Amino acid sequence: MISFVANRLPQGLEALTELALDLRWTWNHATDALWESLSADIWSRTRNPWLILRAVSRRRLEQLASDAGFRQRLAGAVAERRQYLDQPAWFERSGAEPAPRVAYFCLEYGLAEALPLYSGGLGILAGDTLKTASDLGLPMIAVGLLYQQGYARQMLDSVGAQQEFYPANVPGDLPISPALGPDGEWLSVTLRLPGRDAMLRVWQAQVGRVPLLLLDSNHPFNSPADRGITNTLYPAAPEARFLQEIALGIGGWRALAALGHQPEVCHLNEGHAALATLERARQFMRSTGIGFREALWATRAGNVFTTHTSVAAAFDVFPIELARKYGRVYARDIGIDEDELARLGQPLQGSRDEPFNMTFLALRSCGAVNGVSRIHGEVSRRLFGGLFPRWPRQEVPVSHITNGVHAPSWDSPAADRLWTETCGKGRWRGDLKTLACDIQRVDDHALWRLIGDERLELVNQVRSRLKRQLGQRGLDAATVEAAAHVLDPNVLTLGLARRFTAYKRPNLLLTDPDRLARLLTHGEKPVQIVVAGKAHPQDAEGKRLIRAWTEFVQRPDVRARVVFVEDYDVNLAQCMVQGVDAWINTPRRPWEACGTSGMKVLVNGGLNISVLDGWWDEAYSADAGWAIRADRDSDAATDRAEAEQLYTLLEREVVPLFYDRDAEGLPRQWLARIRGSLTTLAPHYSSNRMLDEYLDALYRPAAAAHRRRCADGARLAAELLHWQRTLTTGWSQIRFGKLDIDPIEGGWSFRVPLYLGEVPADAVAVQIYAEPRGAGDTTHWTMRRQAPIDGALNAWNYETTITSARPATDFTPRVLPHHPEAIVPLEVSLIRWWP
């Protein structure tokens, strides 16, 4: 494929291949004019430079080769790219210790429509993460799958019902190239499956500085069934899904090894890739000659797991028969029995036939776990509490790092110019502290011009899409032509786009259709809405919700004020977040793990109207948006109450504020909210902040712990395994004696004997615990080991004093596992409470 393009390029244009295969053009728009000049038609339809190079005529290429101006622009673009790649990035310039090498695994990546390998927010986040790692210079390599069809594309039929289509991803038309092994040949890796081997070809996409490896089962050596492993993203059949996750996790880590990559950190973006942790341990086991259990202890400290799920029903769970069928040979290879392998993905309690849960496997094979917002961290601690029995909820080992978005991927051309003028060209490539003060310099007139230009562009784009959409349905010419007149570039424009599923409540605004219609058609202060979103192909309720919107937009009284745009994708999302005045998000609290779509409007001057869930629960302030205060796990009655809140907010606050203009025609209070949002929220909810937090809170500690455990032939890992076995064997022997509590000035003195049986005293920690009453409360105090108890084997007195006004009954002794290098309770969840 590369040779095909290279052979077509005339002398002097060879560097076009280099530019087209670097997906940095998805966020660095300096080369847009270059691609447009090759073929304006293909560029406007596909935004795929690689396809342009494959499709444009030789005659056109030769014309450009003789065009000195074009060659000069090409040379400038190449020089700019090489400067970007060669100059030290922010992480290098910051003076901190070198960042660890990170392998990032995800089942989907939303980088651009030219590489459609995603279904929704998880993939968009993964794409933003790779782009940010490139901009900041974090040494990352990503792993995913190359789908022959990818996720469903959406069209609406003549009555507005969703129909799904699966266009083929032709590898030759995608901006990817074969990954070459050390021998210079196209790399393939092998999976040992029951009764046969399956081959996975490895492709590479280049995302600036970050390579993305994509595994493809459509190998001519494979059986027809195995060629379909990477056919469709999220297949419904459990076995097909399980095979896909084997390919991602086990095949992905093998591809890294075959290419000579030795990452210190393995980051699982969701549990789909959890099997990578087992393959990492297996390879370490082979390279060192130690056993699998020691190898898992050595490597798990370097694994990081990010969960995005807010309900247990959404975990990837498979029949245990599948895990045994595909794990039998693997278990034999690593020297454990298949039941031990299966237990890594099963609940603590229950029979040996409990299903296999990929999330549980990730928890048991990683050294750090995080949710993607503060609320989601709390929800995850509740969801995972069963794996840590008797541990207090707040000590279940799940932290949180709130998501962010890659601002250069989502800002409009007009917003990009404004940010460049005020904050400089490299504003999103490093420290964001200067952004807030610089954006304050923008005056109200310039800010309002920006908003107006963006809204006009959105209206034009929506009209164009709607005309094409209606034409594809075969509607009459008059109806199609009427689409050219929907919406008004001077009217308050709301955006509502998401996956259509019940918990996201995309139809909360339709609770009272007539009230919504009155809002839209107000004579002096009208409102308009752009709606978009897909339902999962098997989600009948989600499809019903879409149908309700498509029926509403047919009402003659609102037809010019509300549009449902089909096939919500990256391009449409960019169009919407760049042009709406306000973004509406109405999930059922606390089911929205983060909800990054609302973050994308920030950089463009958009405001948020959202339920206090996910990121908005942290971000909301009265001077930067609006909040819908929600109950947990809403029912029909609370849904109606929250719909009433939304209508009231729009009628009494949002709409009046937008239309409240001064003598110069400016909505000063609306602009003040935009300025507050741009100043405080846009920098903080960028993926720069997110990735910096990952580096400091998770990646660096994980890499350091991994190095310590792997040193000296994994001596520390063997020590930790022995420590765990000692605790597990002897834990039931531990018992408390009589607790003595004495009052002291300002608090209490606690003394309790502890009989440890065969558990060494230095293998445990003894504490006094108290349930926190508020945020920041101290929850535990260490008890000091005193003299041994006469006449008893391995028995000791423990004591401590606590200054507190709380009653003595609030405090309870407990025993925990202790080792300075262990991650408790993630790695060992034993606990014993007095009495």
Image (cartoon, rainbow, N blue to C red):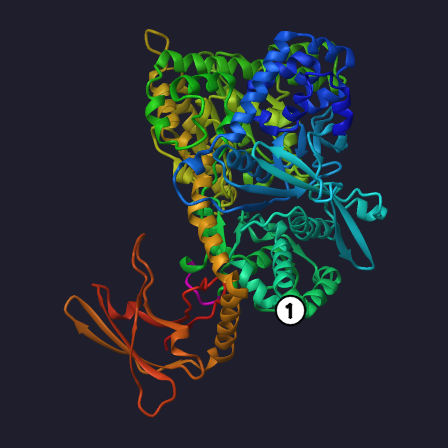
Which residue: 56% across, 26% down?
A: 82
399 drawn magenta:
no
Residue 337 appears at what percent x and percent y?
69, 70
Front residue (pair 704, 406): 704
Question: Which quarter of the image is occupied by the N terminus?
Answer: top right
Disc 1 secondary structure class: helix
**How many numbered marks are there?**
1
Of the residues shown, which amino acid type is indicated by label 1?
Glu
Residue 313's spot in the image, x, y percent? 60, 52
Going by the picture, which residue comes out furthest to the bottom? 791
Magenta highlight range? 389-393
- The residue at 60%/39% (across/down) is 501
* Position of 310 relative to 345 (above/below): above
Residue at left offset 53%, top offset 69%: 718
> Does 654 appear above or below 267?
above
Which quadrant of the figure contains the C terminus?
A: bottom left
Residue 611 shows in the view: no
* Residue situated furthest left in the rendering: 745
Which residue is at the front of the view, 50 or 550? 50
- Mark 1 crowd level (few <14, some 14–19, many ≥20, 10 Å Cα): few
> Where does residue 815 sit, x and y in percent of width and height?
39, 73
Residue 681 at least partly seen: yes
Q: Residue 664 location, x and y as percent?
A: 34, 7
User: Badge 1 is on which residue?
Assistant: 340
Name the residue at 49% across, 37% down: 640
Q: Quadrant of residue 422?
A: top left
Left/right of residue 221 with respect to residue 103 in the rendered view: right
Q: Main secondary structure of the magenta part?
A: loop
